[in-house]
């Protein structure tokens, strides 16, 4: 075995890594443009920049729809809400991950079920998933760690056969591919982070992608408080993998109007509480 550099062996690298993040005049000009616009918060949603970015990012990853969000943790929370997660539902997660993967599960009063990781990839070990499934299991949340992918072939087989949703945590997998599909495009949702340490960064930020119009509708209704979704979903847009609670909203005539009514009621309650 070669001698470690720390004990006097030859270093693998002598030149320091470049500072991160990197930027050019293009980023500087874009920031100045937003600064001058005085539209810093992205309202009304989605504003020009957020909408363009989300569409291009989703397409680059191989999905039909995308929404820019505050961070990757919020992206997972929104995805869990969109599939209809309810208090007491179980979500299978890897035992080795960042708290941002599990935090949203707890925030929704659901139960994270930890499954060990594959020692070769440090990703969720698909071989151990089936023994962790119970009648309360509603979703599997694999994390693609350090550009290593969880075994999506096996995870999707298990999920599809049981009508369980799959939400991919792709915070480390921007641009990565599985079976010629971009990260986040195989499951029902793909959730991304653009925090400072990530492969693609805006300092902070996140995105969720999906190819289901119904799920896209739901994510919009959750993100845009006191507003309806921006498109009308087809009654037949529900993917076969989603196991939805009966209390979750379903796509049908008047879906957007009902969503707006619910959101308006929530917003009114918040204002009353604040006063």
Image (spheres, grey):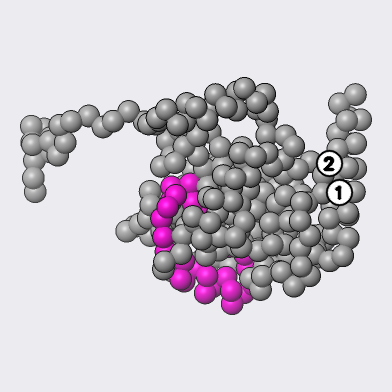
Q: Residue at point 72% right, 34% down?
A: 43
Left or right: 41 in relation to 225: left
Packing grade of label 1 (10 A; few <14, some 14-19, many >=20) is some
In depth, the one of 8 and 182 nearer the eye is 182
Image mark for residue 226? 2
Left or right: 199 in relation to 242: left
What kind of element bears circle 2? Answer: loop
Image coords of residue 98 (percent x, y): 49, 43
Q: Is residue 174 visible?
A: yes
Q: Residue at point 88% right, 54% down?
A: 257
Image coords of residue 97 (percent x, y): 47, 47
- Quarter of the image with the C terminus is top right
Residues shaded magenta: 152-178
Q: Can residue 69 be seen in this view?
A: no
Image mark for residue 219? none
| CA gap, disc 1 and disc 2 | 6 Å
Q: Residue at point 68% right, 28% down?
A: 39
Image mark for residue 260? 1
Discs 1, 2 touching: Cβ within 8 Å? yes
In the image, residue 141 above or below residue 45: below
Q: Residue at point 88% right, 42% down?
A: 264
Left or right: 199 in relation to 268: left
In the image, residue 157 above or below residue 275: below
Specify which label sits upstream in the sequence, 1 or 2.
Answer: 2
In depth, the one of 100 and 61 nearer the eye is 61
């Amino acid at each position: 075995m070669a001698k470690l550099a720390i004990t006097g062996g030859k270093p693998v690298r002598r030149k320091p890594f470049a500072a991160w993040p990197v930027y050019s005049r293009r980023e500087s000009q874009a920031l100045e443009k937003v600064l001058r616009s005085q539209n810093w918060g992205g309202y009304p949603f989605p504003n020009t920049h957020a909408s363009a970015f989300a569409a291009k990012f989703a397409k680059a990853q191989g999905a039909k729809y995308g929404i820019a969000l505050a961070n990757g943790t919020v992206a997972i929370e929104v995805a869990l809400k969109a599939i209809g997660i309810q208090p007491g539902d179980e979500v299978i997660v890897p035992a080795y991950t960042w708290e941002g993967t599990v935090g949203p599960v707890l925030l929704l009063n659901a139960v994270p079920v930890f499954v060990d990781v594959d020692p070769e990839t440090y990703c969720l070990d698909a071989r151990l998933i089936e023994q962790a499934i119970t009648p309360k299991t509603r979703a599997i949340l694999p994390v693609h760690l350090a550009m290593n992918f969880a075994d999506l072939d096996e995870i999707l087989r298990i999920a599809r056969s049981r009508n369980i949703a799959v939400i991919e945590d792709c915070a480390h997998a921007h641009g990565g591919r599985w079976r010629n599909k971009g990260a986040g495009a195989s499951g029902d949702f793909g959730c991304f982070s653009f925090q400072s340490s990530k492969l693609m960064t805006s300092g902070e930020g996140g995105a969720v992608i999906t190819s289901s119009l119904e799920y896209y509708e739901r994510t919009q209704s959750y993100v845009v408080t006191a507003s309806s979704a921006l498109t009308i979903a087809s009654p037949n847009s529900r993917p076969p993998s989603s196991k939805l609670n009966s209390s979750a909203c379903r796509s049908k005539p008047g879906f957007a109007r009902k969503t707006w009514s619910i959101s308006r009621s929530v917003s009114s309650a918040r204002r009353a509480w604040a006063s």
